[in-house]
Image: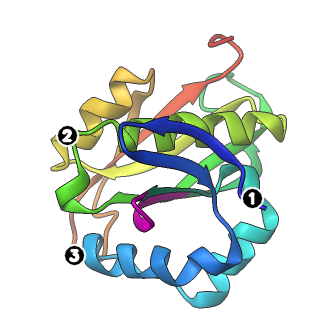
Amino acid sequence: MQVILRQVGDAIIRRCEPSDLISVMEINMKTLPEHYSDYFYESLLSDIPEAFIVAEMHGKHVGYIMCKTEFGFSNFKKLGFVKKGHVVSVAVLDEYRNKGIGKALIEESNLGVKLRQCVEMYLEVRCSNNDAVKLYENLGYIVKQRLRSYYRDGEDAYLMVIEFSNQD
């Protein structure tokens, strides 16, 4: 059963279903240099469907976000060990960017990890991806650290984080 979370213009934002995974993988292949195994997508959808979100326009998949949850040291508390969300991958096809779809995907995934009692969320983003960094900052994420040579091609990443307890 499709759970439509919101509409953004002509796009619907909804939870991913197993039948969406091939389209999600195709979007990943077209837009990002990092790729994952079929099993990886399936396991994230199985583990936390509340934060695996797709965007669809006129029956065509145009974007997605997939996350996972984990326990680890807090990015905000000196000695805190917390449950947190991790944005594994987010992408919107080039021709559908700057329409609010990416923002909606991120907001809905934040809500999804909050449902799993996560108190913060983090992600890595290429330092050169100014549009994405600006989008995350507008949503309340902060740059916590620069990760040197994070990507396979040697590019640095920003570790960006948001704390939910102060957001509600």
Residue at the extreme bottom: 38
Count of number-bearing discs: 3
> In the depicted view, which residue is nearer to us: 27 or 130?
27
Identified at 50% across, 33% down, the residue is 161
Say few, some or many: other residues with alpha carbon within 10 Å of mark 1 (under 14 / 14 to 19 / 20 or more). many
Residue 145: % across, % down: 39, 38
User: Is 98 on the left-hand or right-hand side of 136?
Assistant: left
Name the residue beneath numbered marker 2.
131
Amino acid tagged 2: Asp
Q: Main secondary structure of the magenta part?
A: strand
Image quarter of residue 93: bottom left
Secondary structure state at the residue bearing disc 2: helix
Establish if 25 lies above or below 64.
below
Question: Which of the two discs, 1 and 3, sits closer to the camera?
Answer: 1
Secondary structure state at the residue bearing disc 3: loop
Q: Which residues are magenta?
A: 57-65
Establish if 36 lies above or below 117.
below
Amino acid tagged 1: Pro
Question: Which of the two discs, 3 and 2, sits closer to the camera?
Answer: 2
> In the depicted view, which residue is nearer to us: 79 or 139?
139
> In the depicted view, which residue is nearer to us: 156 or 107?
107
Name the residue beneath numbered marker 1.
49
Residue 138: % across, % down: 34, 22
Name the residue beneath numbered marker 3.
153
Amino acid tagged 3: Asp
Q: Is residue 58 highlighted in magenta?
A: yes
Establish if 82 lies above or below 148.
above
Residue 58: % across, % down: 39, 60
